[in-house]
Image (cartoon, helix red, strand yellow):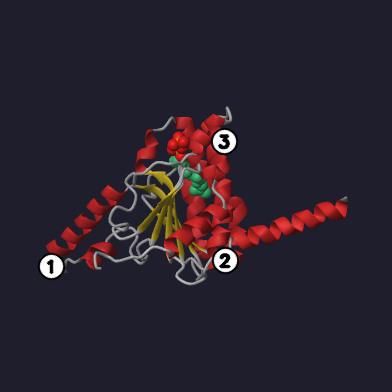
Amino acid sequence: MLNKLMGRKKSEQVDKEKSLDFSSENIPKHIAIIMDGNGRWAKKRGLPRVAGHREGMNVIREIVSTSNEIGVEVLTLYAFSTENWKRPKTEVDFLMRLPERFLNVELPKLIEENVVVRITGERENLPEYTKRAVNKAVEATKENNGLILNFALNYGSRSEIIDGIKSLYKEIEAGEMDINEISESVLSDHLMTANLNDPDLLIRTSGEIRLSNFMLWQLAYSEFWFTDVLWPDFSREHFIEAVRVYQNRQRRYGGV
Ligand code: FPP
């Protein structure tokens, strides 16, 4: 009986590996994810919304290790938008505790796996404990040179663009730049994502088809992949499926 069970388990594993089969060529270098649907996942189970966020945090582990495994260079995760402050205080407090909870457990593994932790967003207004946790992770992984795990935290794209324009204006005013020198790449270098390539692939879970103020400039030529799967149910298999779909798309950047 045991042998039989073990046998079945083994063949299931082989099936799983087969189903993950995908080309190791043309892997998207930068994948950005809008992790949506935590609240609905919890509601469906009669649980408080925060239970969905906790479950959502657990999914991140698998997606980070799969990204590392298949050779993704940058993984950006939309963890908290500038609009999320409007949520009930208990939910905001819970979300603000997640980086600390995640990193307390995961940081040693991230260091070992050569991951670089980065934050894109306004760090100043974060609670001290959130700042402390993310700063520690950024500092502890800064010498690494593997996957960049970029948390978009307290991030809003429109205000990011406004801030970029303001900093350009200051440089022009100070005589450090001429207005005719402004180009797409110059503006890109004045955004919070300076030094990161634009995402090749955007994934949004939970069936919502919108950008929600996320990387409006950076996603101009990205491929989009939407799924009805709620973020806490998102798995390595869904992630690989998104990569596979990406590999079969033709990116033309406006050409033919
Ligand atoms: C959107 O779902 C999700 C969020 C606003 C938070 C996402 C955060 C995580 C998945 C965990 C972050 C973890 C770390 C380590 C930073 P929603 O609440 O809007 O879901 P709903 O649309 O179903 O209500």
Q: Which residue in the rendered view is the most extreme toward the top?
A: 46
Percent position (x, y) of residue 57? 55, 46
| 197 or 19, nearer to the observer | 19
Q: Amino acid at mark 1?
A: Gly
- The residue indicated by pointer 3 is 51
Dot 2: what SS?
helix
Answer with mark 3 or mark 1, whichever residue precedes in sequence: 3
Label 1: element kind: loop
User: Would you place residue 142 above or below residue 76 in this image?
Assistant: below
Q: Is mark 3 within 8 Å of ligand 1?
A: no
Q: Nearer the viewer, mark 2 or mark 3?
A: 2
Q: Nearer the N terminus, badge 2 or badge 3? A: 3
Q: Nearer the viewer, residue 182 or 37?
A: 37
Q: Which residue is mark 1?
A: 175
Q: Which numbered marker is on residue 69?
A: 2
Q: How many marks?
A: 3
Question: Depth-wise, is mark 3 or mark 1 nearer the camera?
Answer: 3
Kind of residue at badge 2: Glu
Q: Which quarter of the rendering shows the C terminus? A: bottom left
Quick one: label 3, few (<14), some, or many (20+) residues within 10 Å?
Answer: some
- For marks 2 and 3, give the CA distance: 28 Å
Element marked by disc 3: helix
Query: How far apart, in angstroms, are the residues tagged by discs 1 and 2?
Result: 47 Å
